[in-house]
Image (cartoon, rainbow, N blue to C red):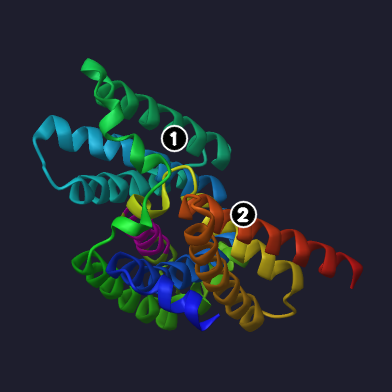
Amino acid sequence: MIEMLQQFFQFDFMKRAFVAILVITPLLGILGTMIVHKRMAYFSDALGHSALTGIAIGVVLGITDTNLSMIIFAVVFALLLNAINRRALAATDTIISVFASCSTAVGLAILSMGGNFSKYSAILVGDILSITAEEIGYLLVIFVVTLIFWAVAVNTLNAISIHPTLAKSRHMNVRLIEDIFAVLIAVIVMLSIKWVGILLINALLILPAASSRNISENMREYHLYSVIFSLFSGVVGLFVSYYTNVATGPMIVIVASLIYFGTYLFGKNR
């Protein structure tokens, strides 16, 4: 076992990937609890797919930093979804599905011009092994910001998810908190998507939280188990992918899926 660990950590890129997992997975586990609680799975999935449009807009405008163009577009996209959703012109999932489909199509159309989409196909599944020390630093900053926001606003978010009208009557700024939460999701999804992948980011947001919900008896357990499951999936998935020569992102999702099915059966039997 010790020899296996020594072999695993002999490469610098594996050390960076391990540190990144320790930062990314708790972030996704924390946010995932409220996404599941507020039934926002469609929302996070739409944000993930909008990354293609963010990259495409960056290409058109000549922005070399794809992270910057993705984040700017995702923040605008998230706030726009919130604004339209408040008007209640249609069902929430319908609005989000329409926006996701449209933005994805526009992004694919622009990036595929001249047959150049192959340059961006890697972002579909991600590559955690390519992360740099500077990028880990960005993740640590957003991790601290998320913890501060969570400590201040978690009770307000819970109240809003249960009964928005009641939350307003208690003088809670529902619109501001919802917008801040949406922006936070957008930034974290865009910062993580390069290493997790567009096709997998939503799974890592939803599965640990859904697993936790299967067995939790209160909100404290719900948040704690979600972080534990997310962290466990990330670490085990990284180790297994290294020794089986399988892509890291899909392996993490497979581990998270197994945890979900296990907690579902345990919760159902209990």
Query: Label 2: how many residues lie within 10 Å, few (<14), some (14-19) or many (20+)?
Result: some
Magenta-span inclusion, residue 5:
no
**Rendered location of residue 120, percent (x, y):** 29, 35
Callout 2: SS = helix
Residue furthest right as drawn: 269
Q: Left or right: where does residue 192 sit relative to residue 233?
A: left
The residue located at (17%, 38%) in the rendering is 58
Q: Which residues are magenta?
A: 178-190
The x and y percentages for residue 133 are 22, 69
Q: State whether the magenta stretch is mostly helix, strand or loop.
A: helix
Front-most of residues 230 and 205:
230
Question: On the image, numbered disc 2 is attached to which residue?
Answer: 254
- Residues under numbered marks 2 and 1 in contact, where contact means CB atoms less than 8 Å apart: no
- Residue 148 lies left or right of residue 90; in this view the side is left
Closer to us: 197 or 67:
197
Q: Specify the label residue 232 is tagged with.
A: none
Per the image, is 179 magenta?
yes
Q: Is residue 16 left or right of residue 215?
A: left
Query: With respect to residue 175, does 141 lie above or below?
Result: below
Q: Which residue is mark 1?
A: 100
- SS at badge 1: helix
**Residue type at mark 2?**
Ile
Q: Quadrant of the N terminus?
A: bottom right
Q: Is residue 66 visible?
A: yes
